Amino acid sequence: MNRTLYDLIGLAAGVAFILALKGLSHPKTARRGNLIGAFGAALATLVVFFHTNEGSSLPLNNLGWILGAIAVGLVIGVPAARKVQMTQMPQLVALFNGVGGGAAALVAIVEYLNLGDTATTAEVIFTVFTVIVGCVSFSGSIITFMKLQELMTTRPVIFPAGRFIIAATLVSVLGVGGWVVNSLGTTPLLILAGLSLLFGILFVLPVGGADVPIVISLLNAFTGLTVAASGYVLDSTLLIIAGTLVGASGTILTRLMAEAMGRSLFGTLFGAFTAKPQDVAAAGEERPVRSGSPDDVAILLNYARRVVIVPGFGLAVAQAQHTVRELADLMISKGIDVAYGIHPVAGRMPGHMNVLLAEANVPYDQLAEMDEVNPTFGQTDVAIVIGANDVVNPAAQTTPGCPIYGMPILEVNNAANIIFLKRSMRPGFAGIENELLYDPKTMLLFGDAKASLTKVVSALKAL
């Protein structure tokens, strides 16, 4: 295959990536967009095997190693993607993102070693950039995975002089990067990789659990930029196109999510160092709450005119999306106006709730974004909160210094009645108490969300 045909097929794959992003911008076209993107990735991979290297009669060098690596990736990736639960999807995304950044950094290092003294200054600069950002993306994504999987604390991890240590590490990374450009040595490049890995860890540690989705999006943008830079080093237009698309879309998504959280990106990443201590209730202190039974909830819903369902991570944990769809359909058959209030960062990643409800074939016109549904809570008879906590917590509006202060929330506290489905009184992912649980108009329904909703459906059918 000559270079011109190779480039044209690469361009077609790039167009497929653009169309995929366009499709992923709306739930109705997301499945088609995903398939187009997968086709583009497959095309980009396959065409490499038919492109002849200059000066070689073989399509590829080290073909056995390449096929072996692909086989290992398939053995690990396919079962992981098929078996992963919806509750663990954000962790999987974080891992895949980190692997992408790490792979780009390794490829850049190997290419740098192959080029040796023939490397141009521009190629060395792009190699340094790829190694820095790729390593930061890799180690940072591992920390986000551990936070999401609760293998470590979800609270911000701060330490004495933390800001100065992070700043000093960043300065060291940049300094060693300059050393690599000037010396063209292997040892400085390996030191650069190690410092970048350290900086990635320090970069993510101060981020609290509620802000982890924003960091995942930011690291995804980092990975895209890394791939684009490695495309320059490898003289691959396709990598440049794909990496730029990922970097640009990830940057836009990060900005939109930061706005949805009501804070600057800098405040999200390093706000823990300046946050004021919170006054918390004494350990073991008991406060009265109003709990109810499925029959109580069914009676309340039976006489409602408008109900807003607010899904959260607890809905995903219980895999109750089909049951909540059944409840919504039952209420609609009784003439009740039903909507789903969707917070931009509900769950553990952007669009988590949209994907979960789409799995249960919930009509898209029943999904209402935060800005659309908030003005209607004053006319809502019942708000049903299923596993959401931080995204409805009034502390975001009333408690300066708390980790989520300033974040726009779904204002379910304005509804006439609130039904809160929870397993226990445990705080949300941000680790702060929700005063809404103690509101006199809040009824708590304890237990597994799927089991509780099934009982509510049965009781409502009997009325």
Image (spheres, grey):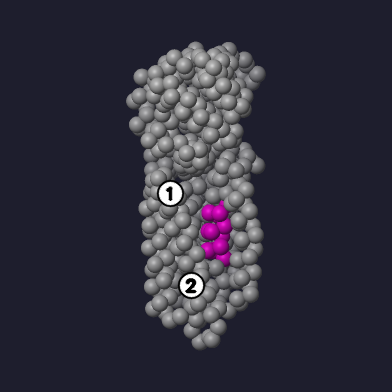
Q: Amino acid at mark 2?
A: Val
| Residue at image point 43% right, 24% down | 333
Location of mark 2 (residue): 47
Relative vertical location of residue 18 with respect to residue 358 in this rendering, above or below:
below
| Residue at image point 39% right, 24% down | 337
Q: Nearer the viewer, residue 381 or 301?
A: 301
Q: Secondary structure at mark 1?
A: helix
Relative vertical location of residue 323 with respect to residue 78 in this rendering, above or below:
above
Based on the picture, tell me whether residue 206 belongs to the magenta stretch.
no
Based on the picture, tell me whether residue 104 belongs to the magenta stretch.
yes
Q: Is residue 225 visible?
A: no
- Measure the alpha-carbon separation of dots 1 and 2: 26 Å
Disc 1 crowd, CA 10 A, few/some/many (<14, 14-19, 20+):
some
Q: Secondary structure at mark 2?
A: helix
| Location of residue 282 in the rendering, given as x and y in whole percent from the top left corner | 61, 19
| Location of residue 224 in the rendering, given as x and y in whole percent from the top left corner | 46, 58
Mark 1 vs 2: CB contact within 8 A: no
- Residue 63 position by quadrant: bottom right
| Residue at image point 57% right, 65% down | 106
Disc 2 crowd, CA 10 A, few/some/many (<14, 14-19, 20+):
some
Report the number of numbered marks: 2
Location of mark 1 (residue): 30
Q: Nearer the viewer, residue 249 or 453?
A: 453
Relative vertical location of residue 298 with respect to residue 118 in this rendering, above or below:
above
Q: Amino acid at mark 1?
A: Ala
Q: Which residues are magenta?
A: 95-106
| Location of residue 209 in the rendering, given as x and y in whole percent from the top left corner | 54, 38
Q: Which mark is residue 237?
A: none
| Residue at image point 35% right, 31% down | 372
